Amino acid sequence: DQQVKQNSPSLSVQEGRISILNCDYTNSMFDYFLWYKKYPAEGPTFLISISSIKDKNEDGRFTVFLNKSAKHLSLHIVPSQPGDSAVYFCAASARSFGNEKLTFGTGTRLTIIP
Amino acid sequence: DGGITQSPKYLFRKEGQNVTLSCEQNLNHDAMYWYRQDPGQGLRLIYYSQIVNDFQKGDIAEGYSVSREKKESFPLTVTSAQKNPTAFYLCASDFREVNQPQHFGDGTRLSIL
C-alpha cells in the first residue's frame, strides 16, 4: 500500500516558467511533509517542508502548498532554472503521533529546457 | 564542516559474503536511518535508531543488520540472506525534534559480482 504517491514520473518545463510537482497521500495521520531534490549518485538534499498547521510555506523560489482535505501537496518552483533539473521526492511523517519515520513517494524527474 | 559521511562510494560483493556499509555523522543528531533505493522507486526504510544501543526494523529489514554503539556511527551489514542486495544505500540522520528534516549522506552503491 503506497501511502505517498507521485503520479507523474517525469515533467519538462521551459526555463523561466513555473514548475509544479504534485504529491498525494492517504494516511490522515501524516502531519509533516517535506520535499527533497536528488541528483544521480548523490544523496537527497532537503528543500522545503510544511507542517499540517499551515497551508503554505515559502523559501525563495520554492513554495509548498498543502491541501489537507484533499490530502494533496504541491511544490512550485518559480522561475525554473537549468540547475533545478533533478529527481524530486516528497515525503511525509506522523511526528505528532510519535512516528518519526519518513514515507517517500517514488519521485518525479524534472527537466528544465533551456 | 558538519555532515554525514558514507563509505565506500562503490562496493562489490561476491555471492554468499556479508558486507558492511559505514555511516558517520558529526551533526550531533540523535536518530539515524538506513534506506535503500532501487531504480524507479522511492526510498524504503531498512532500519533506524533513535538512541544509542537501540534500533528498530523498518519496512524491509530482512537480510540486514545494524548496530548503534556510538551516537555518531550507524553501520549497516548486508548479509548473505539478502537475496537482492544490488541497490543504492542511503544513510540519514536528524534531531528527532518535531518538524526537523532528515539529512542524507551521498550513498553507497552495492553491486554483486
Image: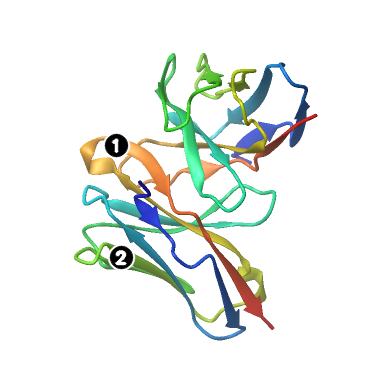
| Residue placed most toward the observer, A82 or B13 | B13
- Residue at 55 percent across and 21 percent down: it is B63
Where does the image place residue A10, in percent across and percent down from the top left?
A: 56, 69
Where does the image place residue B22, in percent across and percent down from the top left?
A: 65, 26
Q: Mark 2 lies on which chain?
A: A
Secondary structure at numbered mark 1: strand
- Residue at 68 percent across and 17 percent down: it is B18
- Label 1: how many Cα within 10 Å (few below 14, some 14–19, many 20+): few
Q: Mark 1 lies on which chain?
A: A
Measured Cα–Cα span from mark 2 to mark 1 = 20 Å
Residue tagged by mark 2?
A72
Q: Earlier in the sequence, mark 2 or mark 1?
A: 2
Q: In which quarter of the image is the C terminus of chain B?
A: top right
> Along the horizontal axis of the image, is A98 left or right of B53?
left
Q: Is residue A101 above or below residue A21?
A: above
Q: Which of the two discs, 2 and 1, sits closer to the camera? A: 2
**Residue A99 badge:** 1
Where does the image place residue A34, in percent across and percent down from the top left?
A: 40, 55
Badge 2 amino acid:
His
Q: In this view, does A113 lie above or below B105?
A: below
Badge 1 amino acid:
Asn
Secondary structure at numbered mark 2: strand
Whether marks 2 and 1 lie on the same chain = yes
